[in-house]
Amino acid sequence: VVRQSNRRSIRPVSPRRARRSDARRDGILKAAARIFRDRGFADAGMRDIAAAADLSPANLYHYFRGKDELLFYCQDRALDRMLASVDRARRGSVNAATQLRQVLAAHVTTMLDEVEGATAHLQVDSLSTVLRRRIVDKRDRYERAVRRIVERGVKSGEFSAGDPAIVTRAMLGALNWTATWFRPDGPIPADRVGHTIASFLVRGVETHV
Amino acid sequence: VVRQSNRRSIRPVSPRRARRSDARRDGILKAAARIFRDRGFADAGMRDIAAAADLSPANLYHYFRGKDELLFYCQDRALDRMLASVDRARRGSVNAATQLRQVLAAHVTTMLDEVEGATAHLQVDSLSTVLRRRIVDKRDRYERAVRRIVERGVKSGEFSAGDPAIVTRAMLGALNWTATWFRPDGPIPADRVGHTIASFLVRGVETHV
């Protein structure tokens, strides 16, 4: 069981106070993600994160038990957005190429445009066993959802892929790797990077007509 | 200037002793790469590496000044192999698709089959400024060599790529990411993973006929 560091589950608070606390948690997660991105997870300290979030270290520990809990919530939110993009794509089109292109492009913008997303490519070895299990399960769920789009495309004849499992991992690798080279102040905006890579990857499986 | 921890440059040794020393260095690099792969660079200690290489810590320091020098030599060797594969591919064929497929497949087997190669995907933030510069320069050289194959293919009409620079990085990301999920004891051998991903990526740029 994961212990909640957020005390709301223990003592009742007024709605206004709860809203303020949620906003504070959001701000802390964004600050933590920024520090993880800039220094790497290993070199990030709770003190740096507290300073970036404009909190005292003691106050930071009131919200989160440690670095690994912060990483967990950043990754968990990014994965929720990626899973939501799969649902959106499936509701929006029956065409596997269109669905896949949308999901892959959204993956890149989640990682590059939203601060917490930048932690999605980080390895989960630093998490405690329980938190790691939850992230790995959610990652696997997302990977399966992407692979199912590839497999449906193969079944309908839209796609041909040597090995859908390997090809799906190659796609996710191409997307995750963007976090290592993309510069927010560079000449190419995140959404153009996303569309360029998504089109390239979908071409790699589309059946030539 | 990078200081050589290898004392051969300072005092003359007999050829047999030099050979023994080279073999010892090779063994140490492989042991270090294995520890980096299994524990991550941040959690690897010189003591662990010494134990894995069957040396005393003091003896290990006789060969290498520290963890970052070990990481440097592992990455440097892997990049040398990748650069050599570009030369080999260019000598072997004039066809851009054939060249690219060979280079991308060799990248995967270098990373997955050869222990030092597994460090090639690691970020270089842990290296000292001088060593980092040298690895980043060699990486850039390799990236440019791969991109030039893509660009030549575009010029000759073999390929069409939205943006050769972004597409090349997407390819390298798909390859580097294999180090995070490939299991040597899994059902699919490294060279099959390499060929599957290389074919998929080359399809992504090939002009449909």
Image (tube, coloured by chain):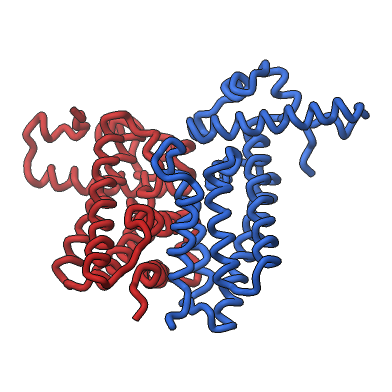
Chain colours: A red, B blue
Q: Quadrant of the N terminus of chain B?
A: top right
Residue shown at 57%/22% (left/top)? Answer: B48
- Measured as percent of width and height from the top left, residue A68 is found at 34, 34
Residue A125 placement: quadrant: top left
Of residues B127 and A90, which is closer to you in this image?
A: A90
- Measured as percent of width and height from the top left, residue A29 is found at 30, 45
Outermost residue toward the top in this view: B56
Residue shown at 32%/57% (left/top)? Answer: A164
Residue shown at 11%/33% (left/top)? Answer: A9
- Measured as percent of width and height from the top left, residue A162 is found at 37, 60
Residue A95 placement: quadrant: bottom left
Q: With A143 as the anchor, is A185 left or right in this view? A: right
Residue A179's place in the image compared with A72, above or below, is below
Q: Quadrant of the C terminus of chain B?
A: bottom left
Q: With B2 as the anchor, is B198 left or right in this view? A: left
Of residues B153 and B93, which is closer to you in this image?
A: B93
Tag count in the figure?
A: 0
Of residues A164 and B111, which is closer to you in this image?
A: A164
Residue B144 placement: quadrant: bottom right
Of residues A127 and A187, which is closer to you in this image?
A: A127
Residue B93's place in the image compared with B208, above or below, is above
Residue shown at 18%/28% (left/top)? Answer: A1
Is residue A51 visible in this depiction of the protein? no
- Measured as percent of width and height from the top left, residue B43 is found at 50, 29
Is residue A150 visible in this depiction of the protein? yes
